[in-house]
Amino acid sequence: MFTSDPIVSVKNACIFQGINAILQDVNFNIEKYEFVFLIGRTGSGKSSLLKTLYADLPLQMGQAQVAGYDIEKIKTKDIPYLRRKIGIVFQDFQLFTDRTVSDNLMFVMKATGWKDKAKMKTRMAEVLMRVGLGGAASKMPHQLSGGEQQRVVIARALLNEPNILLADEPTGNLDPEVADGIFQLFQDINKQGTAILMATHNHELLKKHPYRILKCDKGQVLDSKTSDFNLSTSL
């Protein structure tokens, strides 16, 4: 059994995409309240690693524990409960374009077990205020800018007060000024107690913010706590 301290603990894991091993002998922990960058060239395994952590890809070899769940043993019926303890932020938003902001959030709450409509409305209002979109509940996604849509995605990820946010290139499709605002929001969320694992290609972020880095490279995951590597060849 893993220790109860890290929010993520991965041991001797092999990450597969289909029958192909993308990453091998993966070992790392992420502590509560920690902010960690995940970097690597396109196709190096970043997204596959994130998908494994939120149980979208099965873990076929090794061990991983995320928010108290053993990922290699998790049952399908328990995946929604895992995802109540983590938040997932995608680069391409994945919002329902035919539903309002509030309906997008409501869908996630219903899928993760919320029942009380009054509590649901209160929580939706809280997370939208937290991301600076207090007046956006009735808007459709197409009425929002790219940065505002990403804030809705972050609000959606915060609905269940997650222990950790897993973010896959959350600023990749945004212009630099908007991206800076989104990154500041992630920092604020981290300072309030939520761990962050953020995949990024943004070299400027890495230079400005000296957080710990995990690097996917040649089938391995290197850790800046224990390895020296050249960032210029990583993105």
Image: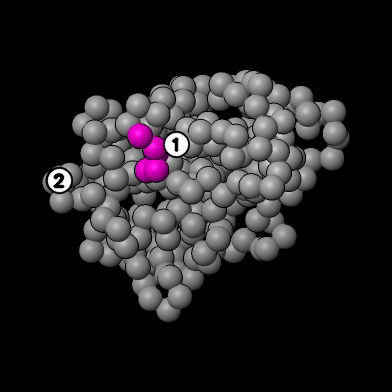
Q: Can residue 150 be seen in this view?
A: yes
Q: Main secondary structure of the magenta part?
A: loop
Report the front residue among 69 and 138. Answer: 138
Q: Real-space Cα distance between discs 1 and 2?
A: 23 Å
Badge 1: residue crowd in 10 Å (few <14, some 14–19, many ≥20): many
The stretch in magenta equals 171-175
Which residue reaches farthest front?
Answer: 143
At horizontal 85% and vertical 28% (from top left) the residue drawn is 118
- Disc 2 target residue: 232
- Mark 1: which amino acid? Ile
From the viewer's side, name the closer residue of 5 and 176. Answer: 176
Q: What residue type is labelled 2?
A: Ser
Judging by the rendered image, the residue that carries numbered circle 1 is 196
- Asked which secondary structure carries label 1, the reply is strand
Quadrant location of residue 144?
Answer: top right
Q: Position of residue 132 (x, y in %)?
A: 56, 21
- Image position, residue 96 (x, y; %): 65, 48
